[in-house]
Amino acid sequence: MISSNTRDILLLLQLIHSKGLIDPKSVNKNEKKLAGIGKDWLNHKSTQLSIIQGDLHAMKAAPTPDQIVKTYQELLEQNSECRNTTDLANKYYYARIIEVEEKIKENKDEFRKELEVNKVN
């Protein structure tokens, strides 16, 4: 698996989808498109953030087409209700929304606590 980070997986799936690789068979047969997807994924600001944050340890080269296909197949196996790229992207999109909402809630809670501490002083 290239990454276990929801944000990174979602980006990969969105890039695959944007190239029209919807059916699993089409993903397996497009080495040239996958090579471009790997480069786009690695160079994306979101992926670079994951590298800086340590989520993608020492990722220096773009994932190969074979690595992308393997990750894609693993995602389909782990998410048996998903049949294609669209299904996977939708699932990871909603999972990412939940992550972001939880992070916002945590930040709000921390902010409220900080306000209370400063109110007393």
Image: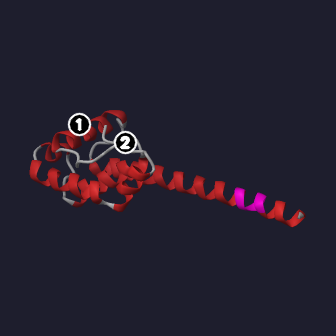
Give the side of residue 42 with respect to residue 108, left or right: left
The residue indicated by pointer 2 is 57
| Residue found at x 14% / y 47% | 26
Where the N terminus falls, by quadrant?
top left
- Quadrant (top left, top right, bottom left, bottom right) of the C terminus: bottom right
Rendered view: 107 above or below 62:
below
Pointer 2 local density, CA inside 10 Å: few below 14, some 14–19, many at least 20: few
Q: Position of residue 95 (x, y in %)?
A: 47, 49
Stretch of the chain drawn in magenta: 110-114
Q: Residue at x 60, y 59 (%)?
A: 104
Give how far apart the Cα atoms at labels 2 and 1 are: 19 Å
Seen in the picture, residue 14 relative to 83 is either above or below; the reply is below
Q: Looking at the picture, which amino acid does disc 1 mark?
A: Lys
For label 2, the SS is: loop
Mark 1 neighbour class, 10 Å CA radius: few under 14, some 14 to 19, many 20 or more: some
On screen, residue 7 above or below 24: below
Q: Which residue is the site of mark 1?
A: 70
Q: Position of residue 21 (x, y in %)?
A: 19, 53
